[in-house]
Amino acid sequence: MQAAAGDYGCGGRCRRFGEKRGKGFAARKTFAKDVVAGVAASATTPYVLGALRYAKKLGATTIGVAANRVGPLMKLAKIFVAPEVGPEV
């Protein structure tokens, strides 16, 4: 997704997944045999959620990684990883 994020180029300002500035994730060839991982500290980043929704719709396996154990990313990802993190020091 990182490569797609670089192409997408809207810096979180896009309202819905698929709006183009660059070609973005939707232009990547994603298939059911692929695995798509999304990383979002808050588990609520719109671009990450949109990419996982798109990948899930195509039948790809989805993985979510977040510091927040509660959020929509947990429901979208087939595999969800939320490491226990301590306070910043």
Image (tube, rainbow, N blue to C red):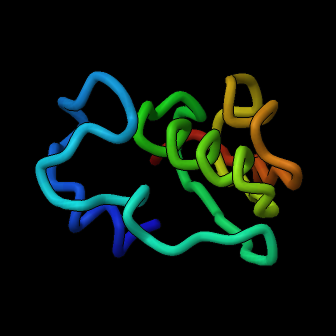
Nearest to the observer: residue 57 or residue 62: 57
- In the rendering, at what x and y percent does residue 28 appear? 44, 71
Looking at the image, residue 19 lies above or below residue 58 = above
- In the rendering, at what x and y percent does residue 83 appear? 76, 53
- In the rendering, at what x and y percent does residue 71 appear? 68, 23
Nearest to the observer: residue 24 or residue 62: 24
What's the residue at 19%, 46% (across, down)? 20
What's the residue at 81%, 31% (across, down)? 75
Splitting the image into 4 quarters, where does residue 17 fall?
A: top left
Splitting the image into 4 quarters, where does residue 37 fall?
A: bottom right
Looking at the image, residue 8 lies above or below residue 70 = below
What's the residue at 73%, 72% (across, down)? 35
Query: In the displayed structure, does residue 81 sit left or right of residue 66?
Result: right
What's the residue at 68%, 25% (across, down)? 72
Q: How many marks?
A: 0
- In the rendering, at what x and y percent does residue 60 appear? 76, 62
Query: In the displayed structure, does residue 28 sit left or right of residue 19?
Result: right
Splitting the image into 4 quarters, where does residue 26 fall?
A: bottom left
